[in-house]
Image (spheres, grey):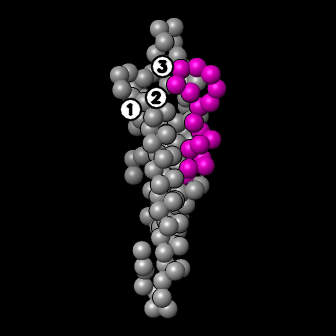
Amino acid sequence: MVFISAVDEGRLQEVVDHNIWAEERKEQLLGVANVAKECLQQEGKGRPKMLRVRNILSKLAPKGPGPRGGRPTNGAGSRPGVVGNSNLQGQIENARSEAQSALDDSQDNTAGFAQGGDDGVFES
């Protein structure tokens, strides 16, 4: 896959939309790319659990004062390297929210299965 080989070979900037790429966010983008690469494993057991994905993305999210969670801005108040509606922070927050929902759903499903009868049939 082009994406995986770009991450492995340190060529992430070649495959990331130029509207998202900003050198000052390189480490954050590499972190997100590495999580995505783990999620693309062919074997299901090689993929990370949603809790791990959520925790990693939470650590990567910008923190601190500043517009919208402390993302870097230029003198004009816009984020360098980001044009229009491109919003890495929003994408990270959406991924974190989806990961949490998937985790919650899987925990609910596990609890429902545990309450099922001896025949192992899931009951909701």
Element on which disc 1 rests = loop
Residue carrying label 1: 17
Vertical position of residue 40 compared to residue 72: above or below: below
The three-letter amino acid code for the residue at tag 2 is Trp
Instruction: Compute the Cα span from label 3 to label 1.
Output: 15 Å
Whether residue 108 is visible to the viewer of this picture, yes or no, is yes
Marks 2, 3: nearer the viewer: 3
Residue carrying label 3: 79
The three-letter amino acid code for the residue at tag 1 is Asp
Vertical position of residue 48 compared to residue 15: above or below: below
| Front in this rendered view, residue 32 or 115 | 115
Q: Is residue 114 left or right of residue 121?
A: right
Do tag 2 and tag 3 residues touch (Cβ < 8 Å)? no
Tell which residue pokes out farthest to the top in this image: 75
Residue 68 place in picture, x, y as percent? 52, 25
Name the residue: 51% across, 46% down. 96
Residue 17 place in picture, x, y as percent? 38, 32
Residue 27 place in picture, x, y as percent? 59, 34
Instruction: Compute the Cα span from label 1 to label 2.
Output: 6 Å
Quarter that holds the C terminus: bottom left
Name the residue: 42% across, 79% down. 123
Question: Which badge, 3 or 1, comes first in the chain's sequence?
Answer: 1
The three-letter amino acid code for the residue at tag 3 is Arg
Element on which disc 2 rests = loop
Question: Which badge, 2 or 3, comes first in the chain's sequence?
Answer: 2
Residue 86 place in picture, x, y as percent? 39, 28
Vertical position of residue 40 compared to residue 93: above or below: below
Do tag 1 and tag 2 residues touch (Cβ < 8 Å)? yes
Residue carrying label 2: 21
Tell which residue pokes out farthest to the bottom in this image: 118
Instruction: Compute the Cα span from label 2 to label 3.
Output: 11 Å
Residues drawn in magenta: 53-69
